[in-house]
Image: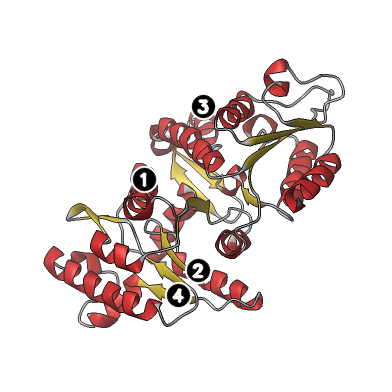
Amino acid sequence: MIIVVTGMVGLNKKSYLEAVCRFAAQNGKQVALRSVGDMMYAEAPDVPPGKILDISLKRLDSLRRSVFKDIIAAASGVPNLIVNTHATFRWRHGLFPAVDFDQMRRLNADMYVCLIDGVVATHLRLLEQHVVEHSLKDLIVWREEEIISTEMLCKGINDKVPFYCLSLGAQEPTVDTFYRLAFQRDMKKAYLSFPMTAVAQLDSVMQEIAEFRSRMKQFLICFDPGDLEEAHLPAVARAGRERGLKQVEVTTSNCRARLSVDEILQIEHDINSQIYARDFLLIDQADMIVSFVPALPDGRAAISSGVERELQHAHEAAKEVYVIWTAPRQHPSVFVTQTANRVFTSVAEAVEFLQKRCAS
């Protein structure tokens, strides 16, 4: 098994992938990790840390090709290999590729994964670990470039092998998800759909959603839109602007930052557009969608336009569609029942059915 893993600068992919290798070892799978950046620095000891992209493109290309040659040679000697690289670089040279197609064909990877994370977490890592001038707009653009470039790389090399976009995980690392994608490929893959913004202030509903997400992840490979936290940023910025603030404190599951109100609002359209496109991408790479529609305190259904659109997209993509509808005072509309393979009245009922469905 050879897996090519990409991701923009500021993700700390190496630490995440080292955790994947440890998790794999605990489950009896030996996985070698080769980080292209580290290997390039090892071959160029005269280049100071953080300065590799400042050297000439000619030397950079030569170093990269030398490192990939070593990786290709070593691939046959290990049972499983993860290649930690980038699909693209954007630096003072402009935007340029981080791999060569001829070498990627010889590597002949079995899977491609593009890792992503939220802009707040990425911004803080870049401030702490890298001397990289950037704006929030830059981070949004770089992330989209890396996803698209990795998908094109995969399709250009071998369109029969899978490509996945996977979040690092906002609340807890998705290391087990990565492992399952690589080594438990017969497991069913599900996109988890649920309301987010409209119920964010309802603690009891958010707890129900958290329990739903946890239960599904016990027996499915789950692509969870909640693993990337940034949809709330524009609302926080608008509230700050109404109070006359120039900066606002933004909190996600594992970090806190002070960000410019104007800078956040400048990327509001980009955030919304990427959520729309990315969630559809996650649905497309799954076998099914499992949508949880919880009840509001007054008994009505907490169904959002986003959830309805996801259900429709999954139906039109010929995915299995399952809906958990718990609202006692409101029945699902025909736009839900006509797209769903099955509608459940509780998470427990859905779990019982899906576990049998996945075992068959």
Q: Position of residue 261 (x, y in %)?
A: 44, 36
Q: List the residue tagged with mark 3.
A: 242
Q: List the residue tagged with mark 1.
A: 148
**Marks 4 and 3, the one that precedes in the sequence:** 4
The correct choice, above or below, for 171 with respect to 56 in the image is: above
**Which secondary structure lies at badge 4?**
strand
Q: Position of residue 316 (x, y in %)?
A: 56, 27
Q: State yes or no: discs 2 and 3 in contact (Cβ < 8 Å).
A: no
Residue at the image point whose x is 30% and y is 79% from the top: 70
Q: List the residue tagged with mark 4.
A: 33
Whole-angstrom CA distance, mark 4 to mark 1, is 24 Å
Residue at the image point whose x is 26% and y is 59% from the top: 101
Q: State yes or no: discs 4 and 3 in contact (Cβ < 8 Å).
A: no
Whole-angstrom CA distance, mark 2 to mark 1, is 21 Å
Q: Quadrant of residue 109?
A: bottom left
Whole-angstrom CA distance, mark 2 to mark 3, is 42 Å
**Marks 2 and 1, the one that precedes in the sequence:** 2
Q: Position of residue 14 (x, y in %)?
A: 45, 69
Residue 17 tag number: 2
**Marks 4 and 1, the one that precedes in the sequence:** 4
- Within 10 Å of the Cα at label 4, are there few (<14), some (14-19), or many (20+) other Cα atoms? some
Residue 107 tag number: none
**Marks 1 and 3, the one that precedes in the sequence:** 1
Q: State yes or no: discs 2 and 4 in contact (Cβ < 8 Å).
A: yes
Q: Nearer the viewer, mark 2 or mark 3?
A: 2
Q: Is residue 239 visible?
A: yes
Whole-angstrom CA distance, mark 2 to mark 4, is 8 Å
Q: Position of residue 246 (x, y in %)?
A: 43, 37
200 on left or right of 21: right
